[in-house]
């Protein structure tokens, strides 16, 4: 009798789990926007088409886009500056660069990570855009950028429903000029062990109509616990977007006891017009991010 009770309890538990999983799948499916294949961008050189709807992916969501190259040379293409309702998602896009032959076309998967949506629902996104970077494969010709916009949501999705990302900008404001706001969110420990286990988290807001670039000023000293060291700060700032940027601290550059007791990180940083530009928009003095 006791064995029978155990078996019945196990079956009931499995049924409850199956209903829970079913509910989770339905909830995730309800977040998928209804979009039809369509031309997203077209000029004499390039044509960009949406060739599939949005589907569930093991890491989040994905859809397929086709890029047609009408030029006389092949191009190496990459995605960048993916923004949804003003939130920059640096990890979204086609995950690797890809080639498009002259006069040919290539279909690639565009990935949106679940973790990057920050509580946003895809079916309520009103403004979804990204850029494609075209570089001539034979290194002849200039690099070109085009901006692609996904179709606007339709039907009942047009309801004015709040769809804000959970991006917190309530840290210590260290820059507020020229349409740029940067707040210091403090030292963070990475969730998973790695060579880079600690970062300084920054809230970054670009309220201008120009794509900008944030980086550490490597021409000046970088001090950790008042010892010369090095960090990595390199972050795109798409026009009219907000996001998080990180100052990465390399554990391998420290003795174990020094890395465990970091109490001062001093450096200067720059906001430039682009990654390869010499035009500086903002140049800061030395800032202690743990003060």
Image (cartoon, grey):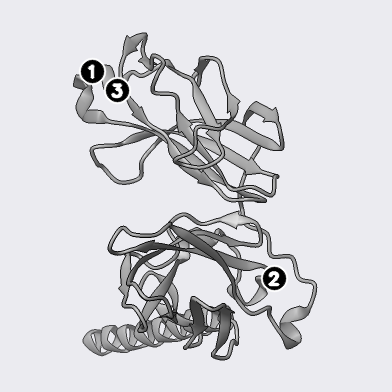
Res. 168 image quadrant: top right
Count residues near mark 3 (Cα–Cα under 10 Å), then give few for <14, some for 14-19, many for 20+. few
Q: Which residue is mark 2?
A: 126
Relative placement, left or right, of 33 versus 229 is: right
User: Where does the image place residue 91, in percent across and percent down from the top left?
Assistant: 42, 57
Q: Nearer the viewer, residue 36 or 219?
A: 219
User: Where does the image place residue 247, in percent across and percent down from the top left?
Assistant: 42, 33
Q: Nearer the viewer, residue 165 or 140?
A: 140
User: Pointers 1 and 3 in contact (CB under 8 A)?
Assistant: yes
Count residues near mark 1 (Cα–Cα under 10 Å), then give few for <14, some for 14-19, many for 20+. few
User: Where does the image place residue 133, in percent across and percent down from the top left?
Assistant: 44, 61
Write the residue at 63% across / 50% down.
239
Camera-near label (2 vs 1) is: 2
Q: Which residue is mark 3?
A: 260
Q: Secondary structure at mark 2?
A: loop
Q: Nearer the viewer, residue 159 or 43?
A: 43
Q: Is residue 291 visible?
A: no
Res. 78 image quadrant: bottom left
Q: Considering only order in the chain, which callout, 1 or 2, is on the residue closer to the N terminus?
A: 2
The label on residue 257 is 1
User: Where does the image place residue 206, in percent across and percent down from the top left?
Assistant: 65, 43
Q: Is residue 79 visible?
A: yes
Q: Quadrant of the N terminus?
A: bottom left
Q: Secondary structure at mark 1?
A: helix
User: Pointers 3 and 2 in contact (CB under 8 A)?
Assistant: no
Relative placement, left or right, of 241 versus 104 is: right
């Amino acid at each position: 009798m006791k064995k029978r009770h155990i078996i019945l309890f196990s079956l009931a538990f499995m049924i409850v789990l199956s209903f829970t999983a079913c509910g989770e799948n339905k909830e995730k499916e309800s977040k998928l926007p209804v979009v039809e294949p369509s031309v997203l961008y077209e000029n004499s050189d390039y044509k960009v088409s949406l060739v599939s709807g949005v589907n569930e992916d093991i890491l989040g969501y994905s859809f397929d886009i086709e890029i047609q190259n009408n030029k006389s040379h092949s191009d190496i293409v990459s995605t960048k500056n993916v923004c949804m309702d003003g939130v920059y998602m640096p990890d979204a896009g086609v995950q690797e660069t890809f080639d498009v032959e002259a006069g040919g076309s290539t279909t690639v998967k565009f990935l949106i990570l679940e973790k990057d949506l920050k509580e946003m629902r895809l079916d309520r996104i009103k403004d979804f855009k990204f850029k494609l970077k075209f570089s001539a494969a034979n290194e002849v010709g200039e690099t070109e950028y085009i901006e692609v916009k996904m179709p606007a949501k339709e039907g009942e999705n047009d309801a004015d429903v709040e769809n804000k990302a959970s991006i917190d900008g309530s840290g210590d404001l260290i820059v507020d000029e020229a349409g740029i706001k940067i707040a210091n969110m403090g030292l963070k420990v990475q969730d998973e062990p790695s060579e880079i286990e600690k970062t300084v988290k920054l809230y970054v807001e670009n309220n201008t109509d120009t794509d900008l670039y944030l980086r550490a000023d490597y021409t000046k000293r970088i001090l950790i616990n008042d010892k010369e060291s090095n960090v990595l700060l390199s972050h795109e700032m798409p026009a009219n977007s907000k996001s998080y940027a990180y100052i990465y601290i390399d554990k391998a550059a420290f003795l174990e006891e020094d890395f465990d007791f970091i109490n001062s990180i001093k450096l200067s940083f720059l906001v430039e017009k682009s990654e390869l530009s010499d035009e500086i928009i903002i140049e800061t003095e030395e800032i202690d991010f743990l003060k």
